[in-house]
Amino acid sequence: MFDRFTALAKRAVVASQDTALHLGHDFIGTEHLLLGLAQTAGTASEVLRAHGVELAQARDRTVRLLEEAGVVADGGQDAKDALASLGIDVAEIQRRADDTFGPGAFQFPRPPYTPHAKKALELTLREAAALGHEEIDTEHMLLGLLAEGEGRATQVLTALGVDTAALRESVLRAAKPAVHRSPLRRAVRGK
């Protein structure tokens, strides 16, 4: 799925995974994708900032919304406990991986995407196609999050006072549809 993503879009996805792990969540939701976009250079972060979305505020609001919803930040403790019951010491595996490959090389568990996050990523592909873009960039990811509309990313944006319809319009203006030139026009222009 990520083969058509630009380097920036891939960086935003990795940032969302890292954010989920850092916050101790055993899932990657739309809120993590939003935070990944907010901290990655690109069109999405520029448009978010223009609408008053700052990373620190978005992170704080995300944590507050998750706590209010009763989401526990346990860092995948259930999975670690299950492996421990089989005699597998995840902390030891982590230590050895860090010694061999460098700090942070082994992250366990790798959080799965929530259904809302999966839907947002699917819509990212559709948004890029609708604009006639071959590659998927951060603006398409933000459009996918906005189109999904039911995940916590929308709740975070709303709690921050962002007009999501106006945000979508700003992203669309920044994304600009691909220009398709016919072969005849290229020949006339000599290109």
Image: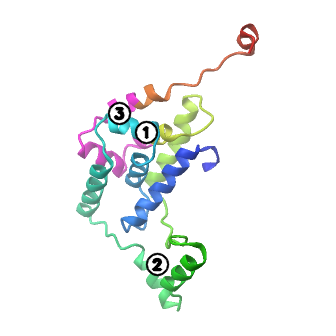
x then y, percent, for residue 121: 51, 47
Is 164 contained in the magenta span? yes
Q: Is residue 178 above or below residue 30?
A: above
Region in magenta: 145-170
Q: Which residue is mark 2?
A: 79
Q: CA distance from mark 3 to mark 1?
A: 10 Å
48 left or right, relative to 2: left
- Name the residue type under label 3: Leu
Residue to which mark 1 is pinned: 44
For discs 2 and 1, the disc positioned in front in the rendered view = 1
Q: Element at badge 3?
A: helix
The numbered mark, 2 or 1, whose residue comes first in the sequence reads 1
Q: What residue is at 24 percent from the left and 44 percent from the top?
A: 160
Quick check: can you spot residue 1?
no
Q: Main secondary structure of the magenta part?
A: helix
79 relative to 2 in the view: left or right: left
- In space, the residues marked 2 and 1 are separated at their CA atoms by 34 Å
Q: Disc 2, disc 1: CB below 8 Å?
A: no
| Relative vertical location of residue 163 with respect to residue 191 in this rendering, above or below | below
From the image, state whether disc 3 or disc 2 is nearer to you.
3
Residue type pointed to by label 1: Ala
In which image quadrant can residue 114 be found?
bottom left
Does 14 lie within the magenta span? no
Regarding mark 1 in the picture, which secondary structure is present there?
helix
Give the labeled residue for mark 3.
Answer: 167
Residue type beneath disc 2 = Ala
In what quadrant of the picture does the C terminus appear?
top right
The image shows residue 32 at horizontal and vertical percentages of 40, 55
Give neighbour class at mark 1: few <14, some 14-19, many 20+ (Cα, 10 Å): many
Count how many numbered circles sit on residues in the image: 3
Q: Residue at 54% across / 76% down in the picture?
A: 98
